[in-house]
Image (cartoon, helix red, strand yellow):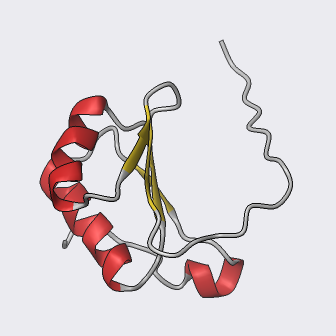
Amino acid sequence: MSDIKLDIDRLKRRGYSEAVFCECKSIEQLEEIFSTFEHNGQNVIGTRASIEQYQKLKIKFPKLKYNERARVIILEKTKIEKIGEVAVCTAGT
């Protein structure tokens, strides 16, 4: 994992784990990333994930969830109390 730097301490500092941009990553890189977070007992969310990435990762991570419309992969290692609502606002062309 020489070219990948993960912020494993973000959970302690910010209260939530790092989000992983999946679009340009290989399955091997994503497996290593998700394994590292799982090994550290942390949840992980992958953004811009393809259905193909999800299907391949699901073999190694059976509890993996995928939202096809949002293109988000979620590995929930520990339950999180869901409070409030979240709005994701973007702008551009």
Q: Is residue 19 above or below residue 35?
A: above
Q: Please name whichever residue, 79 or 19, is drawn nearer the observer in this view of the structure.
A: 79
Residue displayed at 82% across by 61% down: 83
Question: Residue 50 location in percent, x, y?
Answer: 31, 32
Q: Looking at the image, is 4 positioned above or below residue 20?
A: below
Task: Locate residue 14: give its quadrant.
Answer: bottom right
Q: Residue at x 46, y 81 (%)?
A: 8
Total numbered labels placed on residues in the image:
0
Of the 4 image quadrants, the one containing the N terminus is bottom left
**Identity of the residue drawn at 43% across and 28% down:** 68
* Quarter-of-image position of residue 30: bottom left
Residue occupying the point 47% across, 65% down: 76
Residue 5 on image: x %, y %: 35, 71
Task: Locate the C terminus and report the quarter of the image it occupies.
Answer: top right
Observer-nearest residue: 56 or 93?
56
* Relative to 56, residue 38 above or below: below
Give the percent coordinates (x, y) of residue 39.
31, 83
Residue extending furthest toward the right: 84
Residue 52 placed where, x, y %?
Answer: 21, 33
**Is 57 displayed left or right of 6 in the figure?**
left
> Residue most toward the top?
93
Left or right side of 9 for 24 = left
Instruction: Name the residue nearer the viewer: 3 or 74.
Output: 74
